[in-house]
Image (tube, helix red, strand yellow):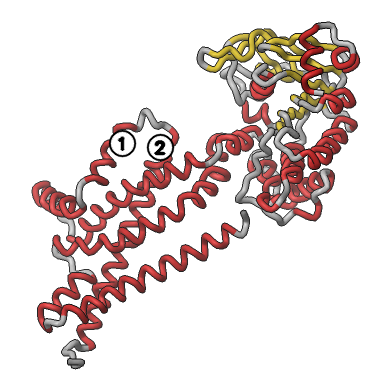
Amino acid sequence: MIEIENVHKSFGDLDVIKGVSLTVNKGEVVSIIGGSGSGKSTLLMCINGLEVIQQGSIRVDGTEVHNKATDLNRLRQKIGIVFQQWNAFPHLTVLENVMLAPRKVLGQSRAEAEDIAVRQLTHVGLADKLKVFPGKLSGGQQQRMAIARALAMSPDYMLFDEATSALDPQLVGEVLDTMRMLAEDGMTMVLVTHEISFAREVSDRVAFFRNGLVHEIGTPEQVLVSPQYAETADFLKSVL
Amino acid sequence: MLTTSITSTDLLFLLQGAWTTILLTLWAMLLGTAGGVICGLLRATLPRATLPLAWVLDAFRSVPLLIQFVLFNSLKSIAGLDWSAFSVACAVLGVYAAAYCTEIVRSGVLAVSPNVRRAGRSLGMNYWQDLRYIVLPMATRIAFPGWLNLALSVMKDTALVMWIGIVELLRASQIIVTRIQEPLLVLCIAGLIYYFISLVVARLGNQLEKRWQEND
Protein backbone atom coordinates (compact mmCIF):
# COMPACT_ATOMS: atom_id res chain seq x y z
CA MET A 1 0.00 0.00 0.00
CA ILE A 2 1.23 3.48 -0.84
CA GLU A 3 0.14 6.12 1.68
CA ILE A 4 0.73 9.71 0.69
CA GLU A 5 -0.06 12.19 3.43
CA ASN A 6 -0.12 15.95 3.10
CA VAL A 7 2.96 16.05 0.86
CA HIS A 8 4.51 19.41 0.00
CA LYS A 9 7.24 19.74 -2.58
CA SER A 10 8.90 22.81 -4.02
CA PHE A 11 11.74 23.55 -6.38
CA GLY A 12 13.29 26.68 -4.91
CA ASP A 13 10.50 29.24 -4.67
CA LEU A 14 8.20 27.24 -6.87
CA ASP A 15 5.65 25.18 -4.93
CA VAL A 16 4.83 22.20 -7.09
CA ILE A 17 2.89 20.03 -4.67
CA LYS A 18 0.92 21.81 -1.99
CA GLY A 19 -0.46 19.19 0.34
CA VAL A 20 -1.43 16.04 -1.52
CA SER A 21 -2.89 13.02 0.26
CA LEU A 22 -3.61 9.83 -1.62
CA THR A 23 -3.72 6.15 -0.79
CA VAL A 24 -3.10 3.43 -3.33
CA ASN A 25 -4.18 -0.01 -2.18
CA LYS A 26 -2.62 -3.28 -3.16
CA GLY A 27 -3.83 -4.40 -6.59
CA GLU A 28 -5.35 -1.04 -7.36
CA VAL A 29 -4.75 0.99 -10.52
CA VAL A 30 -4.86 4.73 -9.89
CA SER A 31 -4.53 7.20 -12.74
CA ILE A 32 -3.44 10.78 -12.22
CA ILE A 33 -4.52 13.31 -14.81
CA GLY A 34 -4.07 17.05 -14.94
CA GLY A 35 -2.44 19.88 -16.84
CA SER A 36 1.32 20.32 -17.11
CA GLY A 37 2.83 21.80 -13.99
CA SER A 38 0.10 20.39 -11.79
CA GLY A 39 2.68 18.31 -9.90
CA LYS A 40 1.59 14.87 -11.01
CA SER A 41 4.92 13.66 -12.42
CA THR A 42 6.79 15.16 -9.49
CA LEU A 43 4.62 13.22 -7.07
CA LEU A 44 5.58 10.00 -8.85
CA MET A 45 9.29 10.83 -8.42
CA CYS A 46 8.67 11.47 -4.73
CA ILE A 47 7.08 8.04 -4.25
CA ASN A 48 10.35 6.21 -4.89
CA GLY A 49 12.54 8.92 -3.41
CA LEU A 50 14.04 10.25 -6.64
CA GLU A 51 12.85 13.65 -5.43
CA VAL A 52 12.87 14.81 -1.82
CA ILE A 53 9.80 16.33 -0.20
CA GLN A 54 9.64 19.33 2.13
CA GLN A 55 6.70 18.30 4.26
CA GLY A 56 4.34 15.38 4.84
CA SER A 57 5.07 11.71 4.49
CA ILE A 58 4.99 8.90 1.96
CA ARG A 59 4.88 5.32 3.17
CA VAL A 60 5.26 2.29 0.96
CA ASP A 61 4.19 -0.91 2.75
CA GLY A 62 4.69 0.98 5.97
CA THR A 63 8.24 2.11 5.16
CA GLU A 64 8.77 5.84 5.38
CA VAL A 65 10.30 6.83 2.00
CA HIS A 66 11.65 10.19 3.10
CA ASN A 67 13.35 9.05 6.24
CA LYS A 68 17.14 9.29 6.39
CA ALA A 69 17.30 5.79 7.85
CA THR A 70 15.40 4.21 4.96
CA ASP A 71 17.46 2.18 2.52
CA LEU A 72 16.15 3.74 -0.68
CA ASN A 73 18.04 1.36 -2.94
CA ARG A 74 16.26 -1.51 -1.26
CA LEU A 75 12.88 0.20 -1.38
CA ARG A 76 13.25 1.04 -5.07
CA GLN A 77 13.66 -2.63 -5.88
CA LYS A 78 9.98 -3.11 -5.31
CA ILE A 79 8.84 0.08 -7.03
CA GLY A 80 9.31 -0.05 -10.79
CA ILE A 81 9.09 3.20 -12.69
CA VAL A 82 8.71 3.86 -16.39
CA PHE A 83 9.65 7.31 -17.63
CA GLN A 84 8.29 9.48 -20.39
CA GLN A 85 11.69 9.42 -22.09
CA TRP A 86 12.23 5.67 -21.86
CA ASN A 87 15.87 6.16 -20.76
CA ALA A 88 17.40 3.04 -22.25
CA PHE A 89 21.04 2.31 -21.40
CA PRO A 90 22.40 2.89 -24.91
CA HIS A 91 25.65 0.97 -24.43
CA LEU A 92 23.89 -2.29 -23.54
CA THR A 93 21.82 -4.64 -25.67
CA VAL A 94 18.12 -5.00 -24.98
CA LEU A 95 18.78 -8.20 -23.04
CA GLU A 96 21.61 -6.61 -21.05
CA ASN A 97 19.46 -3.58 -20.29
CA VAL A 98 16.95 -5.84 -18.61
CA MET A 99 19.55 -8.10 -16.95
CA LEU A 100 21.73 -5.37 -15.45
CA ALA A 101 19.81 -4.50 -12.29
CA PRO A 102 18.73 -8.07 -11.41
CA ARG A 103 22.35 -9.15 -11.64
CA LYS A 104 24.00 -6.24 -9.88
CA VAL A 105 21.30 -5.30 -7.41
CA LEU A 106 19.61 -8.61 -6.67
CA GLY A 107 22.77 -10.62 -7.19
CA GLN A 108 21.19 -13.07 -9.61
CA SER A 109 23.43 -15.34 -11.65
CA ARG A 110 23.78 -14.65 -15.35
CA ALA A 111 21.64 -17.66 -16.26
CA GLU A 112 18.95 -16.76 -13.77
CA ALA A 113 18.81 -13.12 -14.83
CA GLU A 114 18.82 -14.06 -18.50
CA ASP A 115 15.98 -16.47 -17.95
CA ILE A 116 13.85 -13.80 -16.31
CA ALA A 117 14.85 -11.13 -18.82
CA VAL A 118 13.94 -13.31 -21.79
CA ARG A 119 10.61 -14.10 -20.19
CA GLN A 120 9.84 -10.43 -19.54
CA LEU A 121 10.94 -9.35 -22.99
CA THR A 122 8.84 -12.06 -24.58
CA HIS A 123 5.94 -10.87 -22.46
CA VAL A 124 6.23 -7.34 -23.93
CA GLY A 125 6.72 -8.70 -27.45
CA LEU A 126 10.46 -8.13 -27.89
CA ALA A 127 11.63 -11.75 -28.02
CA ASP A 128 13.25 -11.15 -31.41
CA LYS A 129 15.22 -8.07 -30.28
CA LEU A 130 17.32 -9.53 -27.47
CA LYS A 131 20.74 -8.88 -29.02
CA VAL A 132 19.80 -5.53 -30.54
CA PHE A 133 20.99 -2.21 -29.12
CA PRO A 134 18.26 0.23 -28.02
CA GLY A 135 19.34 2.79 -30.62
CA LYS A 136 18.02 0.45 -33.30
CA LEU A 137 14.55 0.22 -31.75
CA SER A 138 11.52 2.43 -32.25
CA GLY A 139 10.31 4.56 -29.37
CA GLY A 140 7.48 2.16 -28.65
CA GLN A 141 9.86 -0.78 -28.56
CA GLN A 142 12.26 1.09 -26.29
CA GLN A 143 9.42 1.92 -23.96
CA ARG A 144 8.29 -1.70 -23.87
CA MET A 145 11.89 -2.65 -23.11
CA ALA A 146 11.87 -0.12 -20.26
CA ILE A 147 8.73 -1.78 -18.91
CA ALA A 148 10.36 -5.21 -19.11
CA ARG A 149 13.45 -3.76 -17.40
CA ALA A 150 11.37 -2.55 -14.50
CA LEU A 151 9.38 -5.80 -14.33
CA ALA A 152 12.54 -7.93 -14.22
CA MET A 153 13.06 -6.68 -10.67
CA SER A 154 9.69 -8.28 -9.80
CA PRO A 155 8.37 -5.04 -8.30
CA ASP A 156 5.22 -4.88 -6.18
CA TYR A 157 4.35 -1.49 -7.62
CA MET A 158 4.68 0.06 -11.04
CA LEU A 159 4.70 3.80 -11.63
CA PHE A 160 4.20 5.13 -15.14
CA ASP A 161 5.21 8.72 -15.78
CA GLU A 162 3.44 9.72 -19.00
CA ALA A 163 4.78 6.56 -20.55
CA THR A 164 3.24 7.27 -23.96
CA SER A 165 3.60 11.05 -24.18
CA ALA A 166 6.85 11.03 -26.14
CA LEU A 167 5.72 8.40 -28.62
CA ASP A 168 4.47 8.75 -32.17
CA PRO A 169 0.70 8.27 -32.19
CA GLN A 170 0.87 4.94 -34.03
CA LEU A 171 3.22 3.55 -31.36
CA VAL A 172 1.07 4.50 -28.38
CA GLY A 173 -1.20 1.48 -28.77
CA GLU A 174 1.50 -1.14 -28.33
CA VAL A 175 2.67 0.41 -25.07
CA LEU A 176 -0.86 0.81 -23.76
CA ASP A 177 -1.50 -2.85 -24.59
CA THR A 178 1.48 -3.81 -22.45
CA MET A 179 0.24 -1.65 -19.59
CA ARG A 180 -3.26 -3.07 -19.92
CA MET A 181 -1.83 -6.57 -19.67
CA LEU A 182 -0.09 -5.62 -16.43
CA ALA A 183 -3.23 -4.13 -14.97
CA GLU A 184 -5.12 -7.31 -15.81
CA ASP A 185 -2.41 -9.33 -14.06
CA GLY A 186 -3.28 -7.46 -10.87
CA MET A 187 -0.21 -5.22 -10.64
CA THR A 188 -0.59 -2.22 -8.32
CA MET A 189 -0.09 0.75 -10.62
CA VAL A 190 0.01 4.52 -10.51
CA LEU A 191 -0.27 6.06 -13.95
CA VAL A 192 0.35 9.67 -14.77
CA THR A 193 -1.28 9.90 -18.15
CA HIS A 194 -2.92 12.02 -20.80
CA GLU A 195 -4.66 9.01 -22.31
CA ILE A 196 -8.08 9.68 -20.83
CA SER A 197 -9.90 6.80 -22.46
CA PHE A 198 -7.18 4.40 -21.40
CA ALA A 199 -7.35 5.74 -17.85
CA ARG A 200 -11.06 5.21 -17.87
CA GLU A 201 -10.70 1.66 -19.06
CA VAL A 202 -8.00 0.35 -16.69
CA SER A 203 -8.25 2.51 -13.57
CA ASP A 204 -10.01 1.72 -10.33
CA ARG A 205 -9.74 5.36 -9.40
CA VAL A 206 -8.79 8.56 -11.17
CA ALA A 207 -7.34 11.65 -9.52
CA PHE A 208 -7.45 15.05 -11.18
CA PHE A 209 -4.51 17.24 -10.14
CA ARG A 210 -4.71 20.99 -10.29
CA ASN A 211 -2.23 23.53 -8.93
CA GLY A 212 -0.39 20.97 -6.85
CA LEU A 213 -3.50 19.57 -5.20
CA VAL A 214 -5.86 16.67 -5.72
CA HIS A 215 -8.80 18.59 -7.10
CA GLU A 216 -11.10 15.67 -7.61
CA ILE A 217 -10.79 11.94 -7.06
CA GLY A 218 -13.12 9.03 -7.56
CA THR A 219 -14.02 6.17 -9.88
CA PRO A 220 -13.38 6.73 -13.58
CA GLU A 221 -17.11 7.24 -14.11
CA GLN A 222 -17.34 9.86 -11.37
CA VAL A 223 -14.30 11.88 -12.45
CA LEU A 224 -14.16 11.38 -16.18
CA VAL A 225 -17.81 11.04 -17.12
CA SER A 226 -19.69 13.19 -14.66
CA PRO A 227 -17.12 15.37 -12.90
CA GLN A 228 -18.24 17.28 -9.86
CA TYR A 229 -16.12 20.39 -10.47
CA ALA A 230 -16.09 22.78 -13.39
CA GLU A 231 -12.25 22.76 -13.53
CA THR A 232 -12.25 18.99 -14.06
CA ALA A 233 -14.82 19.28 -16.80
CA ASP A 234 -12.82 22.09 -18.44
CA PHE A 235 -9.65 20.04 -18.34
CA LEU A 236 -11.36 17.02 -19.86
CA LYS A 237 -12.82 19.18 -22.58
CA SER A 238 -9.35 20.55 -23.36
CA VAL A 239 -7.72 17.14 -23.78
CA LEU A 240 -10.47 15.20 -25.50
CA MET B 1 72.55 15.83 -55.15
CA LEU B 2 70.91 12.54 -54.29
CA THR B 3 73.78 11.26 -52.24
CA THR B 4 73.44 11.24 -48.49
CA SER B 5 75.75 10.50 -45.65
CA ILE B 6 73.02 9.17 -43.38
CA THR B 7 73.90 5.68 -42.17
CA SER B 8 71.92 2.76 -40.86
CA THR B 9 73.36 3.52 -37.43
CA ASP B 10 71.78 6.96 -37.67
CA LEU B 11 68.44 5.42 -38.53
CA LEU B 12 68.74 3.07 -35.60
CA PHE B 13 69.56 6.07 -33.42
CA LEU B 14 66.38 7.77 -34.66
CA LEU B 15 64.34 4.68 -33.91
CA GLN B 16 65.79 4.54 -30.40
CA GLY B 17 64.69 8.15 -29.99
CA ALA B 18 61.26 7.20 -31.27
CA TRP B 19 61.08 4.43 -28.70
CA THR B 20 61.81 6.98 -25.96
CA THR B 21 59.03 9.15 -27.41
CA ILE B 22 56.62 6.23 -27.28
CA LEU B 23 57.60 5.31 -23.72
CA LEU B 24 57.20 8.91 -22.57
CA THR B 25 53.79 9.13 -24.22
CA LEU B 26 52.64 5.87 -22.66
CA TRP B 27 53.72 6.89 -19.18
CA ALA B 28 52.34 10.39 -19.53
CA MET B 29 48.98 9.11 -20.77
CA LEU B 30 48.87 6.41 -18.11
CA LEU B 31 49.47 8.92 -15.32
CA GLY B 32 47.40 11.57 -17.03
CA THR B 33 44.41 9.29 -17.57
CA ALA B 34 44.48 7.92 -14.03
CA GLY B 35 44.74 11.43 -12.59
CA GLY B 36 42.25 12.80 -15.09
CA VAL B 37 39.61 10.19 -14.34
CA ILE B 38 39.87 10.79 -10.59
CA CYS B 39 39.97 14.59 -10.84
CA GLY B 40 37.36 14.66 -13.61
CA LEU B 41 34.90 12.57 -11.61
CA LEU B 42 35.49 14.76 -8.57
CA ARG B 43 34.98 17.91 -10.65
CA ALA B 44 31.78 16.56 -12.17
CA THR B 45 30.35 15.30 -8.89
CA LEU B 46 31.38 18.11 -6.53
CA PRO B 47 31.83 21.16 -8.77
CA ARG B 48 31.81 23.66 -5.93
CA ALA B 49 33.98 21.85 -3.40
CA THR B 50 36.64 21.05 -5.98
CA LEU B 51 36.99 24.57 -7.33
CA PRO B 52 40.51 24.93 -5.86
CA LEU B 53 41.48 21.76 -7.72
CA ALA B 54 40.27 23.39 -10.92
CA TRP B 55 42.49 26.42 -10.27
CA VAL B 56 45.55 24.24 -9.72
CA LEU B 57 44.89 22.24 -12.88
CA ASP B 58 44.29 25.49 -14.78
CA ALA B 59 47.85 26.54 -13.95
CA PHE B 60 49.18 23.41 -15.61
CA ARG B 61 47.09 24.02 -18.69
CA SER B 62 48.04 27.69 -18.92
CA VAL B 63 51.81 27.68 -18.39
CA PRO B 64 53.85 26.54 -21.41
CA LEU B 65 55.08 23.01 -20.97
CA LEU B 66 58.68 24.06 -21.54
CA ILE B 67 58.55 26.34 -18.50
CA GLN B 68 57.03 23.52 -16.46
CA PHE B 69 59.89 21.21 -17.42
CA VAL B 70 62.57 23.71 -16.51
CA LEU B 71 60.86 24.79 -13.28
CA PHE B 72 60.23 21.25 -12.11
CA ASN B 73 63.77 20.25 -12.96
CA SER B 74 65.15 23.11 -10.87
CA LEU B 75 62.72 22.39 -8.03
CA LYS B 76 63.84 18.81 -8.10
CA SER B 77 67.45 19.87 -7.61
CA ILE B 78 66.52 22.34 -4.86
CA ALA B 79 64.42 19.74 -3.05
CA GLY B 80 67.26 17.26 -3.42
CA LEU B 81 65.12 14.66 -5.16
CA ASP B 82 67.16 12.00 -6.82
CA TRP B 83 64.99 11.55 -9.89
CA SER B 84 66.24 10.65 -13.33
CA ALA B 85 65.47 13.05 -16.16
CA PHE B 86 63.11 10.43 -17.53
CA SER B 87 61.11 10.33 -14.29
CA VAL B 88 60.93 14.11 -14.23
CA ALA B 89 59.70 14.08 -17.81
CA CYS B 90 57.02 11.49 -17.04
CA ALA B 91 55.87 13.37 -13.96
CA VAL B 92 55.60 16.73 -15.71
CA LEU B 93 53.94 15.31 -18.82
CA GLY B 94 51.67 13.19 -16.64
CA VAL B 95 50.42 16.17 -14.65
CA TYR B 96 50.04 18.20 -17.82
CA ALA B 97 48.01 15.41 -19.46
CA ALA B 98 45.98 14.96 -16.26
CA ALA B 99 45.02 18.64 -16.31
CA TYR B 100 43.60 18.27 -19.83
CA CYS B 101 42.17 14.82 -19.20
CA THR B 102 40.25 16.11 -16.19
CA GLU B 103 38.24 18.41 -18.42
CA ILE B 104 37.69 15.65 -20.98
CA VAL B 105 36.39 13.27 -18.30
CA ARG B 106 34.30 15.97 -16.68
CA SER B 107 32.57 16.86 -19.93
CA GLY B 108 31.99 13.18 -20.67
CA VAL B 109 30.41 12.52 -17.29
CA LEU B 110 28.26 15.64 -17.46
CA ALA B 111 27.07 14.64 -20.93
CA VAL B 112 25.44 11.47 -19.57
CA SER B 113 21.77 12.32 -19.32
CA PRO B 114 20.61 12.70 -15.71
CA ASN B 115 17.42 10.93 -16.77
CA VAL B 116 19.33 7.80 -17.72
CA ARG B 117 21.11 7.90 -14.36
CA ARG B 118 17.73 8.28 -12.71
CA ALA B 119 16.51 5.21 -14.52
CA GLY B 120 19.48 3.31 -13.11
CA ARG B 121 18.85 4.55 -9.59
CA SER B 122 15.14 3.80 -9.91
CA LEU B 123 16.04 0.13 -10.44
CA GLY B 124 17.68 0.08 -7.04
CA MET B 125 21.29 0.60 -8.12
CA ASN B 126 23.37 2.52 -5.63
CA TYR B 127 25.58 5.48 -6.49
CA TRP B 128 28.63 3.38 -7.26
CA GLN B 129 26.75 0.83 -9.35
CA ASP B 130 25.23 3.66 -11.36
CA LEU B 131 28.71 5.11 -11.83
CA ARG B 132 30.33 1.82 -12.73
CA TYR B 133 27.72 0.30 -15.04
CA ILE B 134 26.01 3.32 -16.57
CA VAL B 135 27.91 6.59 -16.24
CA LEU B 136 31.45 5.41 -16.92
CA PRO B 137 30.69 3.27 -19.99
CA MET B 138 28.58 6.03 -21.50
CA ALA B 139 31.04 8.80 -20.60
CA THR B 140 33.92 6.78 -22.05
CA ARG B 141 32.26 6.69 -25.44
CA ILE B 142 31.59 10.41 -25.32
CA ALA B 143 35.03 11.39 -24.07
CA PHE B 144 37.10 9.01 -26.18
CA PRO B 145 37.69 11.22 -29.25
CA GLY B 146 38.89 14.04 -27.01
CA TRP B 147 41.13 11.66 -25.12
CA LEU B 148 42.64 10.36 -28.36
CA ASN B 149 43.32 13.93 -29.41
CA LEU B 150 45.12 14.49 -26.13
CA ALA B 151 47.23 11.34 -26.61
CA LEU B 152 48.39 12.54 -30.03
CA SER B 153 49.12 16.01 -28.78
CA VAL B 154 51.06 14.70 -25.78
CA MET B 155 53.04 12.47 -28.11
CA LYS B 156 54.27 15.53 -29.96
CA ASP B 157 54.76 17.55 -26.79
CA THR B 158 57.22 14.93 -25.57
CA ALA B 159 59.69 16.62 -27.93
CA LEU B 160 60.15 19.30 -25.28
CA VAL B 161 61.88 16.91 -22.92
CA MET B 162 65.07 17.45 -24.85
CA TRP B 163 65.47 20.61 -22.77
CA ILE B 164 66.10 18.54 -19.67
CA GLY B 165 68.57 16.32 -21.43
CA ILE B 166 66.59 13.39 -22.76
CA VAL B 167 67.28 12.15 -26.25
CA GLU B 168 63.94 11.42 -27.85
CA LEU B 169 63.03 11.40 -31.52
CA LEU B 170 63.38 15.12 -32.24
CA ARG B 171 66.59 15.51 -30.23
CA ALA B 172 68.01 12.44 -31.93
CA SER B 173 67.31 13.94 -35.33
CA GLN B 174 68.92 17.25 -34.30
CA ILE B 175 72.05 15.42 -33.23
CA ILE B 176 72.25 13.74 -36.61
CA VAL B 177 71.55 16.99 -38.44
CA THR B 178 74.41 18.67 -36.59
CA ARG B 179 76.76 15.99 -37.78
CA ILE B 180 75.71 15.34 -41.38
CA GLN B 181 74.17 18.74 -42.19
CA GLU B 182 71.15 17.35 -44.03
CA PRO B 183 68.29 18.86 -42.04
CA LEU B 184 65.65 18.40 -44.72
CA LEU B 185 66.14 14.68 -45.08
CA VAL B 186 66.58 13.94 -41.38
CA LEU B 187 63.59 16.01 -40.30
CA CYS B 188 61.49 14.40 -43.01
CA ILE B 189 62.39 10.97 -41.65
CA ALA B 190 61.67 12.08 -38.09
CA GLY B 191 58.36 13.59 -39.23
CA LEU B 192 57.44 10.34 -40.96
CA ILE B 193 58.14 8.39 -37.80
CA TYR B 194 55.91 10.76 -35.78
CA TYR B 195 53.27 10.44 -38.47
CA PHE B 196 53.47 6.67 -38.41
CA ILE B 197 53.08 6.51 -34.63
CA SER B 198 50.07 8.84 -34.79
CA LEU B 199 48.58 6.82 -37.60
CA VAL B 200 48.70 3.61 -35.59
CA VAL B 201 47.16 5.29 -32.53
CA ALA B 202 44.42 6.98 -34.57
CA ARG B 203 43.61 3.76 -36.43
CA LEU B 204 43.26 1.78 -33.23
CA GLY B 205 41.05 4.53 -31.86
CA ASN B 206 38.88 4.61 -34.95
CA GLN B 207 38.34 0.88 -34.77
CA LEU B 208 37.18 1.15 -31.20
CA GLU B 209 34.84 4.02 -32.07
CA LYS B 210 33.43 2.15 -35.02
CA ARG B 211 32.63 -0.81 -32.80
CA TRP B 212 30.78 1.50 -30.43
CA GLN B 213 28.97 3.30 -33.21
CA GLU B 214 27.55 0.10 -34.61
CA ASN B 215 25.52 -0.04 -31.44
CA ASP B 216 23.93 3.36 -31.83
Is there one chain holding both mark 2 and mark 1?
yes
Is mark 2 in CB contact (under 8 Å) with mark 1? yes
Residue A16 position by quadrant = top right
Q: Residue at x 51, y 15 (%)?
A: A12
Q: Which residue position is annotated with label 2?
A: B42
Tell me if mark 1 has few (under 14), some (14-19) or many (20+) residues whose alpha carbon lies within 10 angstroms of its own. some
Residue A62 at x, y percent in the picture: 72, 16
Indicate left or right for B158 with A239 as reference: left
Instruction: Decide which of A102, B155 is in the foreground and name it.
Output: B155
The kind of residue tagged 1 is Leu
Question: Disc 2 to disc 1, how far (Cα)?
Answer: 9 Å
Q: Quadrant of the N terminus of chain B?
A: bottom left
Dot 1 lies on which element?
A: helix
SS under mark 2:
helix
Residue A101 lies in quadrant: top right
Give the vertical position of A205 relative to B154 (above or below): above
Label 2 is found on which chain of the structure? B
Say which residue appears at 36% left-offset and 28% top-offset: B49
Q: Earlier in the sequence, mark 2 or mark 1?
A: 2
Residue depicted at 41% across the width and 31% down the height? B46
Q: Is residue A52 above or below residue B10?
A: above
Q: Residue A165: x, y in percent?
A: 72, 32
Q: Where's residue A183, x and y in %?
A: 86, 30
Residue for point 80% across, 26% down: A189
Amino acid marked by disc 2: Leu
Q: Is residue A62 visible?
A: yes
Above or below: residue A202 compared with residue A64: below
Residue on which the image places disc 1 = B53
Residue A24 seen in the figure: no
